[in-house]
Amino acid sequence: MRDGAAIQDQIPDNHCFGCGPQNDHGLQIKSYWRGENESVCEFTPLPHHCAGPTRYLNGGIIATVIDCHTICTAIADGYRQAGRDTGTGNKIWYATGKLEVQYRAPAEIDEPVELTAKILERTERKTVLSCELKSAGRLCATANVVAVRVPDNW
Ligand SMILES: CCCCCCCC(=O)SCCNC(=O)CCNC(=O)[C@H](O)C(C)(C)COP(=O)(O)OP(=O)(O)OC[C@H]1O[C@@H](n2cnc3c(N)ncnc32)[C@H](O)[C@@H]1OP(=O)(O)O
């Protein structure tokens, strides 16, 4: 279950490698709200996203999709807290201050990965989130992320 349009399709001028619709060479992940403080994302790896063994997903790609899913969630939440639809009015940007990933099991390259992010804490200056990444129903990575509000011209 997910709510509304993809968060990334509402954030303007996003050229990010992991989540920018404007980046033709990027991963172009899509995240969706699921309720007030939770968001979900499904990403289907391509064969060249592999680790050393071709059957497993590369750890940097795992970190990137977690980074982008959580930071885009913080951005959309920033708009919500401001009482605005995502992408309307002055831009709201967050950057990754901290990204701590624990790799618990390998993720299969030929299975989609499912991410669930939760907002744990928010202040005017930062949002703290957790994230889980599953592959074929197995918990493969968990993460703690600090998203820090940066100026709208960042
Ligand atoms: C739509 C676009 C989506 C993009 C998705 C991908 C996101 C990215 O990858 S962004 C690129 C990678 N990140 C960066 O380049 C950021 C580089 N770092 C910076 O610019 C700065 O260090 C920055 C903005 C993170 C923090 O700036 P700084 O002036 O230190 O912030 P500061 O005012 O001290 O801290 C604000 C709050 O954040 C907390 N914080 C800042 N850095 C960290 C950290 N590394 N760990 C934990 N907490 C932190 C502080 O403790 C403070 O919390 P509190 O208000 O409770 O005291």
Image (cartoon, grey):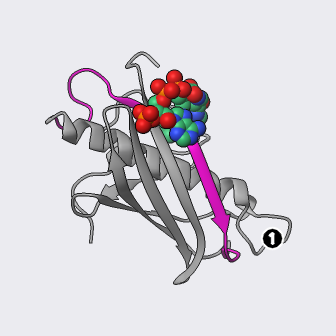
Q: Nearer the viewer, residue 76 or 27?
A: 76
- Looking at the rendering, which quadrant does residue 80 occupy? top left
Q: Position of residue 76 (x, y in %)?
A: 30, 42
User: Is 30 placed above or below 40 here?
Assistant: above
Q: Residue at x 21, y 28 (%)?
A: 88
Q: Position of residue 126 (x, y in %)?
A: 40, 37
Span highlighted in magenta in the image: 84-108
Give 114 or 48, whichever is nearer the viewer. Answer: 114
Provide the secondary structure element on which disc 1 rests: loop
Magenta stretch holds residue 2: no
Judge left or right: residue 101 versus residue 85: right
Q: Nearer the viewer, residue 31 or 36?
A: 36
Side of 5 where 98 appears, left or right? right
The residue that appears at 40% across and 19% down in the rendered structure is 151
Image spot of residue 83 (x, y percent):
13, 36
- What is the residue that sits farthest to the left in this orientation? 83
The quarter of the picture where residue 57 lies is bottom right
Kind of residue indicated by mark 1 = Thr
Q: Residue furthest bottom?
A: 137
Residue position for label 1:
54
Q: Is residue 103 magenta?
A: yes
Q: Where's the N terminus, which quadrant?
A: bottom left
